[in-house]
Image (cartoon, coloured by chain):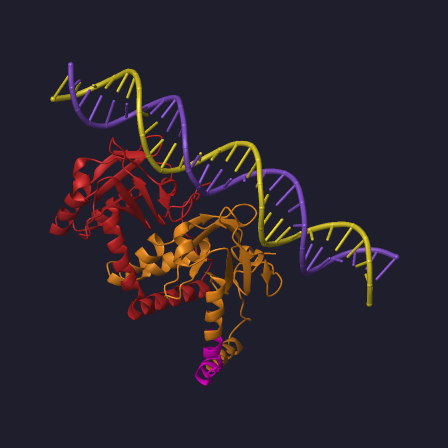
Chain colours: A orange, B red, C purple, D yellow
Amino acid sequence: MRGLGRISQGWRVFVSTYESAIDAKGRVSIPASFRAALGGGNRIFLWLALDGSGCLEGGGEALMAMYRATLTRLAPHSPARKALVTRIIAGSADLKMDDTGRIKLSDELMTAANLTDRVKFAGNMDSFQIWNPDRHAEHFDAMAAEAAKEDTLEALGHAYSEVLQQQGSGNTALKLVDGGDS
Amino acid sequence: MRGLGRISQGWRVFVSTYESAIDAKGRVSIPASFRAALGGGNRIFLWLALDGSGCLEGGGEALMAMYRATLTRLAPHSPARKALVTRIIAGSADLKMDDTGRIKLSDELMTAANLTDRVKFAGNMDSFQIWNPDRHAEHFDAMAAEAAKEDTLEALGHAYSEVLQQQGSGNTALKLVDGGDS
DNA sequence: TTGAGGCCCATAGTGTCCCATGATACTCCA
DNA sequence: TGGAGTATCATGGGACACTATGGGCCTCAA
């Protein structure tokens, strides 16, 4: 496995991108820093990304808890809620990480995301993504182009200023996580 | 049996989708992760889903307790309460899981949900569903299409942000379950 | 007696555990 | 500052446990 950088301690945010291999048994190692971001749990949920980008999206129990809270917030019998529950809850794989940090990807997931022998793990703040490396390269280039646009940068600047103000006027410094350990 | 993924420990949420077979005696294995979500009980309640989707909906004693509490909250002699009590309480099958985790589906349930030799178990958070596999495929595709709509994604995003804010401003981190064991 | 349901045992497949190994990055000490 | 030692990590592979599933036997009721 090769990554862009090195580790971390006690974060709850998935950052950076890592590549790793799928072995003969269909197992793939979760990057160590992502394991740390999972906060010690060994359960991993994965589903086909909602945005149609063709990657898998996933996270640990904390993420699933977030989604559960989110979904129960939607109107009980709305079509949106039914659709999202089906798509996210029923449509996600419930995987267990072994004690060396590997999960076994099912055939459905592999074909759905067009995975063969290598994958790219991409951090996505609260969740992470699993990509076919080639697709990820395309995606990354597209995103880089979009990010370089004037409008995009302006939006970033605005939002950043707002946060700065809020932080300045406010109390303490922002924290990246609430429950970071050691 | 083939499913999207693997196992669990001590949750009370039904997640993921699994396919399994009905044997010559009309028995069907409850997926191991769903058994875990049932919390150790061996009693299963099943009824025809209220929304007319043609699947069976079910859960364990915890779910039935939830429904009981919910129904008693309705006005005692209201038509709605009578109807729902009849439909859910009277209309549900009370099945006992054997020690290898199988239940026997009655003919009524089989025909009502159009089940023959294979079924799909679909997690639905607090409950699960049992589908004819073909019907489930249609249903899932329809839900996926609905979930991919702009409006739906936007609603999800909004709700997610709210949960994030609430969590950030609030107290402790979210917990997925209240009574997780082991 | 006959059919159905419940209980028990058997079995194949596969997911999981636990071992080992090589490589890499980090640490410590000279 | 550089090199040896050490910890961490990704990966491979064998053994085992668990799961899904099939089938036989017993019991009970019609």
Quarter containing the C terminus of chain A: bottom right
| B161 up-or-down from A60: above or below | below
Asked if the magenta segment contains residue A148, the reply would be yes
A19 or A161: nearer the eye?
Answer: A19
Q: Residue B28 location in percent, x, y?
A: 29, 36
State which region is magenta: A143-157
Q: Residue B18 location in percent, x, y?
A: 34, 46
Q: Residue at x 26, y 51 (%)?
A: B136
Quarter containing the N terminus of chain A: bottom right
Residue C28, image quadrant = bottom right
Asked if the magenta segment contains residue A180, the reply would be no
A34 or A73: nearer the eye?
Answer: A34
B28 or B129: nearer the eye?
Answer: B28
> Is residue A136 at all visible to an observer of this figure?
yes
> Is residue B91 at all visible to an observer of this figure?
no
Q: Residue at x 54, y 67 (%)?
A: A175
Q: Residue C11 location in percent, x, y?
A: 41, 28
On screen, residue A93 versus residue D11, left or right, reads left
On screen, residue B85 versus residue A17, left or right, reads left
**Magenta region, mostly helix, strand or loop?**
helix
Residue A35, image quadrant = bottom right
| B144 up-or-down from A161: above or below | above
- Label count reads 0
| C26 up-or-down from A26: above or below | below
Q: Residue A138 location in percent, x, y?
A: 47, 70
B164 or B31: nearer the eye?
Answer: B31
Q: Residue furthest bottom?
A: A150
On screen, residue A165 versus residue B51, left or right, reads right
